[in-house]
Image: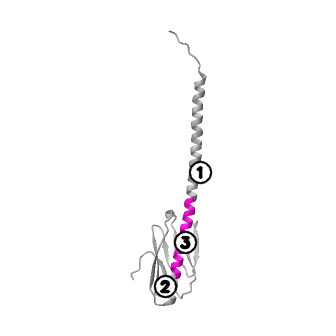
């Protein structure tokens, strides 16, 4: 029995169609993955900004309450823990510091930089710098006419 070799061009065209279909699917999957990754990154950045602003507002309100306690009694001692909102900004080396006119927050690259004004209506001195890496609670402490930010719970 003898066989003749036949050139079957339909099979080759089908194989090339499979390859192009695979490459088209790979392109769509890659494009979708890049789009979703960009969406996730922008959402994380927005949530980080909102969390940092909320932290500023919370600490600023606690400083105002400490000033109110100092206005009522110049010898008052007051401590208030402020629970910080968690954010994905752990790698940003964010610091919060207190001056006589505002609570400030900034990262090492100064991408996130903001301030929350305080009234400063009491005769107190405001100070303190806290690095927020790994910190969940900041203490606003009034003692001896000084309002400070600190990480440790005061002993009173």
Alpha-carbon distance for marks 2 and 1?
50 Å
Q: Is residue 95 left or right of residue 20?
A: left
* Pointer 2 with pointer 1, Cβ within 8 A: no
Check disc 2: other Cα within 10 Å, few if <14, some if 14-19, many if 20+.
some
Quarter of the picture containing the C terminus is: bottom left
Q: Which residues are magenta?
A: 43-64
Q: Is residue 58 magenta?
A: yes
Q: Check the image and report above or below for 37 versus 51.
A: above
Q: Is residue 104 left or right of residue 151?
A: right
> Mark 2 or mark 1, which has the lower sequence index?
1
Alpha-carbon distance for marks 3 and 2?
20 Å
Q: Which residue is mark 2?
A: 146
Q: Residue at x 48, y 73 (%)?
A: 130
Q: Check the image and report above or below for 10 versus 24.
A: above
Q: Which residue lies most toward the left here?
A: 155
- The number of discs equals 3
Q: Mark 2 against mark 1, which lies toward the viewer?
A: 1
> Mark 3 or mark 2, which has the lower sequence index?
3
Quick one: SS at disc 3?
A: strand
Check disc 1: other Cα within 10 Å, few if <14, some if 14-19, many if 20+.
few
Quick one: SS at disc 1?
A: helix
* Pointer 3 with pointer 2, Cβ within 8 A: no
Q: Residue at x 53, y 12 (%)?
A: 3
Check disc 3: other Cα within 10 Å, few if <14, some if 14-19, many if 20+.
many
> In the image, which disc is placed on residue 105?
3
Which of 153/99 is in front? 153
> Mark 1 or mark 3, which has the lower sequence index?
1
Q: Residue at x 56, y 67 (%)?
A: 50
Q: Which residue is mark 1?
A: 35
Q: Mark 1 against mark 3, which lies toward the viewer?
A: 1
Q: Is residue 106 visible?
A: no
Q: Residue at x 58, y 17 (%)?
A: 6
């Amino acid at each position: 029995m003898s066989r003749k070799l036949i050139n079957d061009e339909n099979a080759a065209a089908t194989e090339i169609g499979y390859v192009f279909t695979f490459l088209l699917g790979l392109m769509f999957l890659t494009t979708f993955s890049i789009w979703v990754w960009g969406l996730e990154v922008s959402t994380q950045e927005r949530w980080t900004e909102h969390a940092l602003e909320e932290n500023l507002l919370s600490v600023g309100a606690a400083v105002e309450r400490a000033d109110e306690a100092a206005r009522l009694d110049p010898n008052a001692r007051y401590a208030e823990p402020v629970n910080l909102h968690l954010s994905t900004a752990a790698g940003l080396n964010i610091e919060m510091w207190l001056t006589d006119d505002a609570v400030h927050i900034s990262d090492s690259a100064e991408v996130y930089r903001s301030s929350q004004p305080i009234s400063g209506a009491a005769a107190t001195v405001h100070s303190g710098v806290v690095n927020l890496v790994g910190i969940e609670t900041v203490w606003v402490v009034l003692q001896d006419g000084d309002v400070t930010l600190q990480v440790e719970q005061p002993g009173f």
